Image (cartoon, helix red, strand yellow):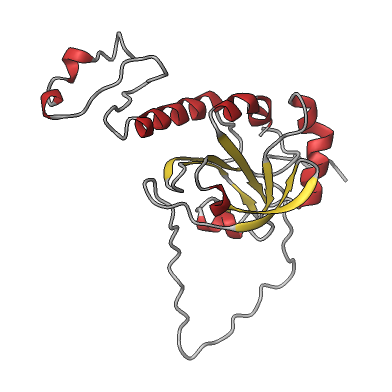
Amino acid sequence: MSAVAANYQTLQELGVEVISVSVDSQFVHKVWNEQELSKMAEKDVPFHMVSDGAGNVGKIYGVYDEDAGVELRGRFIIDPDGIIQAMEVMTPPVGRQLSETIRQIQAFQHVRATKGAEVCPAGWTPGKKVLKPGPDLVGNVWKVWSPLKDH
Amino acid sequence: MSDEAVGCARPTGATVGEPPTEAKHEIPLREEPKMSTVKVGSKAPDFQAPAYYRGKFTSIKLSDFLGQWVMLCFYPGDFTFV
């Protein structure tokens, strides 16, 4: 979560609210923020740190490990209509790559802004080639997009 | 007492001693199927929960964030290493 704290500025510019969830109490969240997170980020972590002691939230999202009594690393991108656009779940020992989450948010925002008229091929980042789905594009993607040059 | 290695998951306790005696049921209990309702392209399940936010103890509701993009992140625990 410290990576999220350190890159909060970027997320804010994209209009993304961050909600973090663990089984720790609000008190532990406060002290972790004061003792550690605030020293990794520029200032206090400005996201909502949810306390899910009984794992009830984690259970409905399928990321609560009942044996260990903790949440797995689950990350969900939710759009302004409350629809889950992307999710990623990992076991605890490996951390996330925040830049990939940011890339996905930018891509979903682009698709939303064009009402689906433009879609983002593999490896898309802002400024790269988008595709316009339609009958003419069927079988012709190779003419307009190259996995070697445009990826 | 030697130090025990600490991992990323928060250690938890369990009972020791004799295994619990199994209660006999006339009608066998049927386990409720566990269904995670979460799918991409579907509505994110709403929840309300206590939170800590900018120095204050608050309560948040996911549906209060409608109209905004949300990154919802679960993680094993505060003060873990990754």
Residue A49 visible to an observer of this rendering = yes
Quadrant where the image shows the N terminus of chain A: top right
- Provide residue A4's location: percent of width, then percent of height: 63, 30
Question: Of all residues shown, which one is farthest toward the top?
Answer: A149
- Provide residue A122's location: percent of width, then percent of height: 33, 23
Q: Residue at x 29, y 27 (%)?
A: A118
Q: Residue B27 or A58: which is nearer the viewer?
A: A58
Q: Residue at x 74, y 58 (%)?
A: B13
Which quarter of the picture shows residue A56?
bottom right
Whether A145 is drawn above or below A40: the answer is above
Which quarter of the picture shows residue B80?
top right
Q: Residue at x 40, y 32 (%)?
A: A108
- Provide residue A97's location: percent of width, then percent of height: 54, 27
Q: Is B20 situated left or right of A146 in this image?
A: right
Q: Residue A129 or B74: which is nearer the viewer?
A: A129
Q: Residue B45 or B10: which is nearer the viewer?
A: B45
Q: Is A70 situated left or right of B68 in this image?
A: right
- Provide residue B19's location: percent of width, then percent of height: 66, 72
Whether B2 is drawn above or below B23: the answer is above
Quadrant where the image shows the C terminus of chain A: top left
Q: Residue at x 36, y 46 (%)?
A: B41
Whether A108 is drawn above or below A50: the answer is above
Question: Of all residues shown, which one is farthest toward the bottom?
Answer: B26
